[in-house]
Image (cartoon, rainbow, N blue to C red):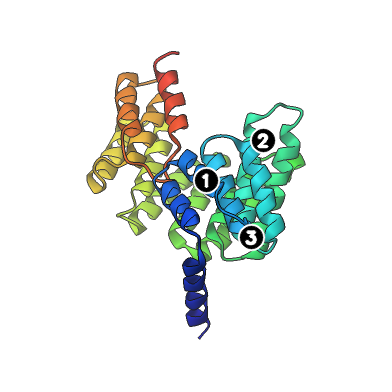
Amino acid sequence: MHQILVALSLAGLMLGASPELERARKLYSLTDFEGSLKALRQVNPKDGDVYELIGRSHYMMGDYKKATENLEKAMAADPSSSAHALWLGRAYGRRAETSTLLTAPGHASKARQYFEKAVQLDPNNLEAINDLFEYYLEAPGFLGGGYDKAAGLAGRIARIDPVEGHYAQARLAEKRKEYGSAEEQLRRAADLAPHQVGRLIDLARFLAKQGRYQESEQSFQRAEAIAPESPQVMFARADTYIKNGRNLPAARELLKKYLSANLTPDDPPRYEAEKLLRQASGS
């Protein structure tokens, strides 16, 4: 009964959505973020979902300050939304990565607070749990990070999604320099989800970091066989080559193909590919 009521509620929301909002959502899905913003300016009044989409569009364009400003408005309009809190955490996280030493800690702390709020609001929001896990794994203790905290979330991830749980255990093992265990967990994830190219990409990246380039190539080739011309594989392969300072001509060609491919919001933004291309070109 609850599922039927939820479905009816969602249908009502969709029927009540303005043409401009529907157009904005369509443009966003096609990665035309500027077009999406233009359409969203015509939507009045603006609710939490509209402000979230405005914030996400700015985020995808690399303007993290405007992203946080609009996502704060989304949270103010609907403070019970786990999705709003998650995207606000992501935006503050990117501000921390791209700001000065003076302002980065404050942005990082806000990122953690909003990731934690997203999980509190929806304990089954796997994206939020994953992002909080990564924060705990990467952030120093004085900013609320810690391997013990990450380990606690890894078990929670595994209960929701066993494949993702193996990846979380691999990330934790790699941080602890337990490389054999990390590889074992990545291979388990790939075996459990043989049609998910992301699992083979994870393994390929790990092997490349270990200097095992031939095995890394084999994993990328398996990913390509599953999803030929996949933008996800192109970007990951180019990024891996550049990070390891090898196969730079191939990396440049892959990035050029990526930039001309049909992307989705789940793919890395074009500006990140352009930045990598400049790096691979020595400019």
Q: Tag 2: residue type? A: Ala
**In this rendering, would 219 be left or right of 63?**
left
At x 43%, y 58%, the residue is 163
3D distance between C-alphas at marks 3 and 2: 20 Å
Q: Earlier in the sequence, mark 1 or mark 3?
A: 3
**What is the C-alpha distance between the residues marked 1 and 3?**
20 Å
Residue at 36% x, 59% y is 192
Q: How many marks?
A: 3
Q: Are marks 3 and 2 in contact (CB under 8 Å)?
A: no
Nearer-N-terminus badge (1/2): 2
Residue under circle 1?
A: 171
Q: Secondary structure at mark 2?
A: helix
Note whether residue 136 is visible: no
Amino acid at circle 1? Arg
Q: Can the viewer see residue 257?
A: yes
Residue beneath disc 3: 119
Residue type at mark 3: give it: Val
Q: For marks 1 and 2, give the CA distance.
A: 21 Å
The quadrant in which the C terminus is found is top left
Image coordinates for residue 180, horizontal then vertical, percent? 45, 43
Most distant residue in the bottom direction: 1
- Residue 194 rendering spot, x and y as whole percentages: 30, 55
Local secondary structure at mark 1: helix
Q: Please tell me whether residue 143 is drawn above or below residue 115 in the rendered image.
A: above
Q: Which residue sits at x=33%, y=35%?
A: 234
Label 3's element?
A: helix
Q: What residue is disc 2 on?
A: 96
